[in-house]
Image: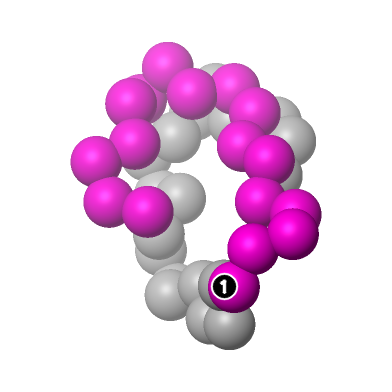
């Protein structure tokens, strides 16, 4: 998803219709530790 806050730590993406995750989509999210 576009425009994620840089402070994002966890993103729950189960039970959705995502088919592809573009390369680099989570780049810059240094606090992210769980997808």
Q: Residue at x 59, y 73 (%)?
A: 17
How crowded is the residue under tag 1: few (<14 C-alpha within 10 Å), some, or many (20+)? Answer: few
Residue 12 picture location, percent across and down: 68, 40
Q: Is residue 10 left or right of residue 27?
A: right
Provide the residue span drawn in magenta.
1-17
Position of 15 relative to 11 (above/below): below
Q: Is residue 9 magenta?
A: yes
Residue 18 part of the magenta segment = no
Q: Residue furthest left?
A: 3
Residue 33 falls left or right of residue 11: right
Instruction: Name the magenta segment's main secondary structure.
Output: loop
SS at mark 1 in the image? loop
Q: Quadrant of residue 25?
A: bottom left
Q: Residue furthest bottom?
A: 19
What's the residue at 75%, 54% (across, down)? 14
- The image position of residue 5, as x and y in percent, is 33, 26
> Which percent across, then down, holds residue 9?
59, 22
Instruction: Give the residue at x 61% y 37%.
Output: 11
In the picture of the structure, the residue carrying the numbered disc 1 is: 18
Tell me the quadrant of the picture where the N terminus can be found. bottom left
Q: Quadrant of residue 4?
A: top left
17 relative to 1, above or below:
below
The answer to which quarter of the image holds residue 16 is: bottom right
Q: Position of residue 35 (x, y in %)?
A: 70, 44
Q: Nearer the viewer, residue 6 or 16?
A: 16
The image shows residue 26, relative to residue 12, as above or below, that is: below
């Amino acid at each position: 998803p576009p425009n994620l806050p840089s402070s994002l730590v966890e993103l729950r993406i189960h039970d959705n219709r995502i088919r592809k995750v573009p390369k680099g989509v989570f780049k810059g999210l240094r606090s992210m530790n769980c997808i």
